[in-house]
Amino acid sequence: MQIKNFAAKYQIQADTIRYYEKENILTPKRRENGYRVYDEECEKQLQFIIVLKQLGFTIKEIQQLLLLRNQPISTECNVSTVSLLDQKIINLEEKVQFYQKALQVVNKIKGLIAEDKYIKNKEVIEELMLGFFEDTKPRRIR
């Protein structure tokens, strides 16, 4: 499969595919003429990358995981992987808490403005928003 079709299949830009190659997290084979060939292995790699990106992994973290994945199984490799995943779990839990709190605030605001009650509840709504801002200041979503 050529880059244009490969990128379209996964709804990403060809430049993104090239960037992943540059960062050594996607490694297509090359034909004699230098054209890239995206095969089943590339599809698996890209699916892995997409899932990790959706989970909030950075390119550096994805590089690290791929590096660990390609190493022989060892205690050191296992400890490194678990440590990285532990940090991601903490980040994801923080995001979940943030979004749960955000959902509560948005639902409260919705109730306060329903049925043309905005003017009456304007100050309460502003207090809710400012309170939410203050509550979430230390752990802004990245």
Image: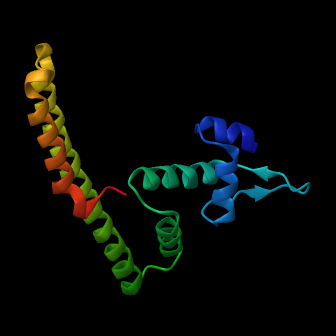
Task: Note whether 129 is above or below 69 in the view shown.
Answer: above
Classify residue 65 as left or right of residue 75. right
Instruction: Say which residue appears at 16% left-offset and 38% top-offset.
Output: 126
Task: Note whether 9 is above or below 133 in the view shown.
Answer: above
Q: Nearer the viewer, residue 35 or 39?
A: 35
Task: Note whether 133 is above or below 110 in the view shown.
Answer: below
Taking the view exactly as shown, the residue that stands out farthest to the bottom is 76
Residue 10 in percent (x, y) is at 58, 39
Task: Note whether 33 is above or below 66 in the view shown.
Answer: above
Residue 36 in percent (x, y) is at 78, 52
Residue 66 in percent (x, y) is at 52, 68
The quadrant holding residue 103 is top left
Task: Tell me the quarter of the image containing the N terminus.
Answer: top right
Answer whether residue 93 is visible to the viewer in this image: no
Q: Which of 16 and 141 is in front in this view?
A: 141
Residue 78 in percent (x, y) is at 36, 78
Instruction: Say which residue appears at 41% left-offset and 81% top-offset.
Output: 77
Classify residue 9 as left or right of residue 136. right
Classify residue 35 as left or right of residue 124. right
Answer whether residue 133 is visible to the viewer in this image: yes
